[in-house]
Image (tube, grey):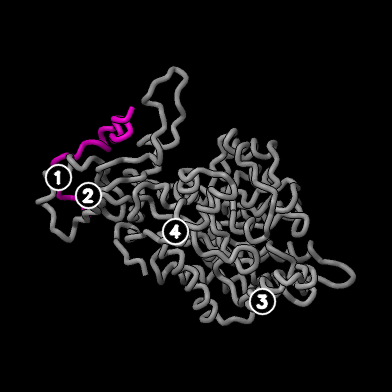
Amino acid sequence: MNELKNSVSKNPIEQTLYVSTTTSFDHVIINANIATFSAQYGFDIETSDDGDEHADSIPYGQLLNAAIGIKSGKVAWVGTQDQITAHLPKYQASQITDVDGKWITPGLIDCHTHIVYGGNRSNEFEARLQGVSYQDIAAQGGGIVATVSATRAASIESLFAQSEKRLIALMKEGVTSIEIKSGYGLDLDTERKMLTVARQLGEKYDIHVSTTYLAAHALPPEYKSHLQDRTDDYIEQVCEWLPILHAEGLVDAVDGFCENIAFSTEQIRQVFEVARSLDLPVKLHSEQLSDIGGSALVAEYKGLSSDHLEHLSEEDIKKMAASNTVAVILPGAFYTLRDTKLPPIEVLRKHQVPIAISTDCNPGTSPLTSLLLTMNMGCTLFYLTPEEVLAGSTVYAAQALGLLNKGKIEVGCDADLALWDITRPADLAYQMGLNPIQGIMIQGQWRDTM
C-alpha cells in the first residue's frame, strides 16, 4: 500500500518518458513532492467492494520525489525523479527548477468573489460592534446601497486601483485563477464598468479571470418607494442588459441572489432563461438565509455551482448531485455574520457533491482577501478536512467555474502551479498568518509573488 501511494500512475503515457521527448519540454521541475488532485494518481477514488488496494484513494493524489515536464504552457509529462535524471544534461540551467523537496500544488482558484467595488464599509463594521442594528445602518444609507453609490460614483481608473490591491493580495497567496462578479452597479453603465475592470485586471496580471454577471444581486434604490418595490420591473431590466453585455464580450457566466430578502426563484428563472438563450452557464447565491429552492433551480439548469448553502435541504442536495452542480461554501461570510447555522457538510459528502471553498471577498459580509485563511476557516468552522479545503480551492473550484483544464496536475492541463515551502499539504490549512508561498507558475511561466 505505501509503495502504491508513492508511485505514479500505471498509465504508460504518464509514466514513460520516451527519448524522443526528452529535449522537447520548455521547462522541467525536479525534486518535487506533488499534490496532483488528479484521479489518475488516486485522488478521491473510492475503495472498491472487493478490497482491491489499487482502488484506494491516495491523499491529495500525491506523488513524492517526482518531476513535471512543461510544454507550451501545459503539463506535458508527470513522473518520478529517477525517470528524468539521466535526461537533465540536455536542458539548459534556465529550463530546470530544482525545488529541493518542496511541494507543488495546482495554482489556487478563488471561485466566488466580488473584489471589484468602490468605497469602504469599515464604519458599518465599527457601528455594528457598538450595537447599531443592520436595519438602522441601512436606513441611514448604509449596507449594499452604500457600496452601490460608491461604485457608481467611482471612475473606471479609481475602481481599477481599488480592486487591484485585492487581486494582488490573493495572488501573493498562490491564486492563479479567479472569478469576479458584478452586482454593485445595478444599472447598465456601472455593471459594464465593473465587468470591464475585471477584464482589465486579468489582462494586466495575465491571470485567468472568469467574469460573472450579477445584476440580480439587490434591488437598486431607484426601484424602491414608500408605496411599493418594483422588483419585477428591475428583473426585466436585468434580462435586457445581459445580451448587451454578453455581446460586448464581458460575461462568462450568470449569477443571482435567490433569497427571501432578494429575488424569488421565478424572478431568477427569468434571468436564467436569458442566460440559456445565450448559452451562458449559471450559478446562484442560495440558501444562505432561508430555503426557497434556489439550489433546486440551479440544478434544473445544470448550473456550475450553488453557493453559501447553510439552509440547503437533502432533497436539493440530491438534485445537485444529479446535475453535477458544485457546492461552494463561504466561511468568511459565516464568520463575519456570526452565523450559527452550519452548511450540511455530512449530507453533501453522503451524496458525493463536490465541495468548493472561496473567500467571497466583498465589502459587507466577507472583506477577506486570504484564500489560505479561508481554508483554515473551512476546517475550524465547517469541520472540513485539510484535503477537502485544498481540493475545494483547486480541482473543485475549477469545476465550479467550468475550467476543465485547471485545478489539477496531469498531462494536458494548464501549467498553473503553486510552489510551497511546507512539510505536508495540510500545512496550508493548519497555519494562520504565515504565507509559505515560494512562487507561482501561470501557463508555464514562473512569476514572482508580487
Say how many tags the image has: 4
Report the residue marked by disc 1: 85
Residue at 41 percent across and 65 percent down: it is 172
Q: Disc 1 vs disc 2: Cβ atoms closer than 8 Å?
A: yes
User: Which SS class for mark 2?
Assistant: strand
Report the residue marked by disc 4: 177
Residue 431 part of the magenta segment: no
Is the residue 70 above or below the residue 137 in the image? above
* Label 3 Cα neighbours within 10 Å, binned few <14 / some 14-19 / many ≥20: few
Q: CA distance from mark 1 to mark 4?
A: 32 Å
Is the residue 214 above or below the residue 35 in the image? below
User: Which SS class for mark 3?
Assistant: helix
Name the mark nearer the viewer: 3 or 1.
3
Instruction: Specify the quadrant that holds the N terminus.
Output: top left
User: Which SS class for mark 4?
Assistant: strand
Report the residue marked by disc 3: 123
Q: CA distance from mark 4 to mark 3?
A: 31 Å
Closer to the chain start, of discs 1 and 2, is: 2
Closer to the chain start, of discs 4 and 3, is: 3
Q: Quadrant of residue 215?
A: bottom right
Residue type (three-letter) at the residue carrying disc 2:
Ile
Q: Disc 4 vs disc 3: Cβ atoms closer than 8 Å?
A: no
Q: Quadrant of residue 344?
A: top right
Residue type (three-letter) at the residue carrying disc 3:
Asn
Closer to the chain start, of discs 3 and 2, is: 2
Residue type (three-letter) at the residue carrying disc 4:
Ser
The span picked out in magenta is 1-29
* Label 4 Cα neighbours within 10 Å, binned few <14 / some 14-19 / many ≥20: many
Q: CA distance from mark 2 to mark 4?
A: 24 Å
